[in-house]
Image (cartoon, coloured by chain):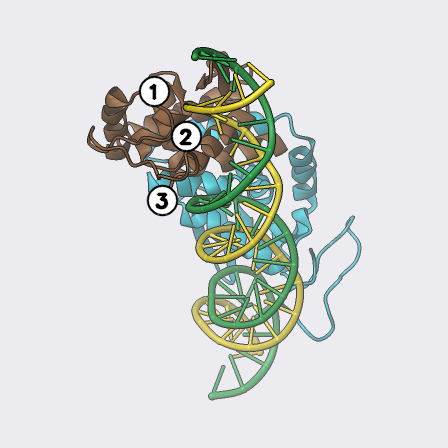
Chain colours: A brown, B cyan, C green, D yellow
Amino acid sequence: MRKLTKLLKVLSDESRLRVLNLLQERECCVCEVMQVMEISQSKASRILSALYDTGLLNLRREGRWALYSIDTDQTKNYVNDILTGIMRALESSPVTKEDLERLKKAERIGPACVTRGGTGCLASKTSTAGGTLR
Amino acid sequence: MRKLTKLLKVLSDESRLRVLNLLQERECCVCEVMQVMEISQSKASRILSALYDTGLLNLRREGRWALYSIDTDQTKNYVNDILTGIMRALESSPVTKEDLERLKKAERIGPACVTRGGTGCLASKTSTAGGTLR
DNA sequence: AATTCAAATGCATATTATTGCATATATGCA
DNA sequence: TGCATATATGCAATAATATGCATTTGAATT
C-alpha cells in the first residue's frame, strides 16, 4: 500500500510526467532533461532521482554521464496498468509533443550550457553548477 | 495534463484509496466511512469531496444522507486503466480487506455515534458534529 | 417557523513538498 | 595526483496539503 501511494505521489506532478514521457522515447542524461524542459540542474537531477527511487527507472553510468531509462520489465503488473493509463492520457497533451521535438535537438553538453532555440550558452561566470532556471 | 496530475495526487493517499475500495463494494454515506475507517466526520467528508471533485464519484442525495458511489461509466479510458492498476494493487493489501469486513457492520447512524467493535457511542456531550477522532 | 440532524466548510495549525543556491561526490583525463 | 566536469545533495526559504475544532448549510420533521 505504501509503495502504491508513493508511486502515485511521484507520478502526480507535471514535470515528472513530462520526464517520464521523454524517457519513453529514449534514454536520457540529466543535462538533456535540463535542456528539453528548461529547468535547473538540481531540479532535473531530483526529478530523475524521484522516479528512480520508485523503481520506475534504470540507471546506467557511462563515464561521467548518468543515463536514465524506463525499467520496462516491471515485475509488478499493476505498475504497468497505471503507466498505460498515464501514457494514454499524455497522448492528447501538446506539451509532451513539444518536449519530444526539443529532445531531438538536445545534446550531451553538460549542465553548464542550456541551448534555447539552439543558440546561447547561459552558464554563470562564477559557477558551473546549480543553474538559475525556474 | 492538469486533470491527470490532479487525479493522481488525489489517489496518492492511503485514506482516500481505502475509501475508494469501500465504494468499490457499495455506495456509502459519510458516516459509514467514518465508522469503517475510524476517522472524524470532517475528514471523511473531505476525502469523499476530494474523490468527487476529480469526477470519480457520483453523489446521490436521499433525505439527509449523501450517498457516494463510484462513477462506473467513465468516459475517459485512461482513468479506467489507472483504477484497474490501483485495484489490482489493493488486492494484496490486508487493510482493505479489514475495511470491507468492518463495512458489513457499518450502519447509517449519523456522525455522532461511532461503533467500535459494535459497542459504544462516543459522541461528545456538547457537540453533535466535528468528531474527535484522528 | 423552529428544531433536528447529516454533511460541508472556514480557520488555524501542523506536516510535507518543492526548489534555488551552494557545495560535495565521483569519474575521467592530463 | 590534481584538475575539470556531470551529477547528487544539504540547507533554507517558500508553498502546498492535511486535519481538528467550531460553525454553517440545507433538508426533513414537528
Residue A86, image x and y in percent? 39, 29
Residue A106, located in which quarter of the rendered image?
top left
Q: Residues within 10 Å of mark 3 (few under 14, many from 20)?
A: few
Residue for badge 1: A108
Task: Measure how far apart labels 1 and 3 are at the Cα level.
Answer: 21 Å
Q: Residues within 10 Å of mark 2 (few under 14, many from 20)?
A: some
Chain letter, disc 2 residue: B
* Amino acid marked by disc 1: Arg
* Amino acid marked by disc 3: Arg
State which quarter of the image contains the C terminus of chain B.
bottom right
Residue at (27% x, 33% y) in the render = A121
Residue D26, image x and y in percent? 43, 69
Instruction: Tell me the SS state at disc 2.
Output: helix
Residue for badge 3: A134
Q: Residues within 10 Å of mark 1 (few under 14, many from 20)?
A: some
Q: Nearer the viewer, residue B127 or A21?
A: A21
Q: Nearer the viewer, mark 3 or mark 2?
A: 3
Residue for badge 2: B80
